[in-house]
Amino acid sequence: MELKDVKGSTYIIESQEEEIKRIALELHEGISQNLYSLYTGLEFLRTGVEQDHLKDYTKEMSDLVSRTLQEVRLLSVELYPSTLKTLGLYAALKSYIKLFTSTFGIIINISTVGNEMELTEQKSMAIFRSCQEALINIAKYADTSEATVHFTWEEKRLKIDISDHGVGFDLQEIIRLNKCKGIAAMKQRMSIAGGELCLFSGEGEGTTVSFILTIQK
Amino acid sequence: MEYKEEQVQELEQQFLLVCDQLRQQLSCDFTGVALQKIQGVDITWPFVSGNRNQKYKYITVRYGKGIAGRVIASGSPMEIVQFPDNIIGKSTEYPIMLAEKMITAYAMPLLWQGSPKGALLIGYRSKHRLEENDYVNLKELGKKVEKLLPLYFAEN
């Protein structure tokens, strides 16, 4: 029964990720390209229009298309960070952290020790999504202005520690109140990728979430 | 150069004065002015009063997102009665509410050259019921802020 549950949730998570990736690529390569063609077309029309009111109207439309294009691009990156495949986990997370700070105003200090190794897309994505979840939890609950993300690359292991000095929480109480769905999701993702999650927290003591992943060369 | 810096500081003081006034008159915990950048669509919180931390300085909201983004995009006021219950979208789309631990908030658009270019927000860290008089006061002080906008956009 337990094996069936794990297989089921693995399938759900994997197919969700596939679908998210498909939508993100469709937004980036389909809709974005069309919007860009519309934008350049409108800009071209603007240069040929002589009446001032029509020129202004074309400018308004072109601005709107440009804004929509920016929105679609951001949405696509939010859904699926393509840098994960091209530049690797550390660069992708660093880029996400930049966005995170400008969204929530929380400063994240990111550092790394050791040589980055190539991970499979499935493992990279699992760890990336888990880090995202941990950071979002900081924004929602930790009540802190700063946190740290530290990568340790060893020969056959990657460890990522995400720590904050925020309000912390009583894990037992959170479990009792059934408010640990985010933690359970991180644990599940890590388990699918063949890794594990360790969590340390206490009221007034901050929180540290560690993701540990064995790397097979 | 020095003269310009003085002008900028004076303008900042005027914005902050209105924020403080608003906080006193409406007995709220937080007031803030969100403004759209003159170039581009991003929105920041350049002037606040009653803040618990410095997060507002780094927050950039996208047009149409969060309380300020939605107010600017729609040109209509927005009220959150008990955050995060019954909000549109996810709680993470309201970074200023999370950063300042606000429960009740009300924001109205600030017009510049006839278009919404900013938002004036009042917030409470516990559930609060706004009275008719509060909306009137907010509208009046909102007009004061709007009068400062031509100077702000000229400087920026």
Image (cartoon, rainbow, N blue to C red):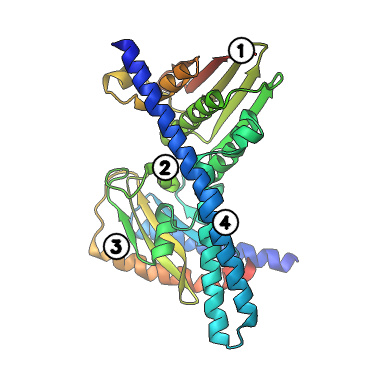
Neighbours of disc 3 within 10 Å: few (<14), some (14-19), many (20+): some
Give the Cα separation between the discs numbered 3 and 4. Answer: 48 Å
Give the Cα separation between the discs numbered 2 and 4. Answer: 29 Å
- Extreme residue in the bottom direction: A51
Decide if residue A21 is on the left or right side of residue B104.
Answer: right
Of circles 2 and 4, the one toward us is 4
Q: Where, quadrant-wise, is the C terminus of chain A in this rendering?
A: top right
Marks 2/4 in contact by CB < 8 Å: the verdict is no
Neighbours of disc 4 within 10 Å: few (<14), some (14-19), many (20+): some
Q: Which chain hosts label 4?
A: A
Q: Secondary structure at mark 2?
A: helix
Give the Cα separation between the discs numbered 1 and 4. Answer: 39 Å
Q: Which label sits on residue B92? A: 2
Of circles 1 and 4, the one toward us is 4
Residue behind mark 1: A216
Q: Where, quadrant-wise, is the N terminus of chain A in this rendering?
A: top left
Q: Looking at the rendering, which quadrant does residue B41 occupy?
A: bottom right
Of circles 3 and 2, the one toward us is 2
Residue behind mark 4: A33
N-term mark: 1 or 4: 4
Q: Secondary structure at mark 3?
A: helix
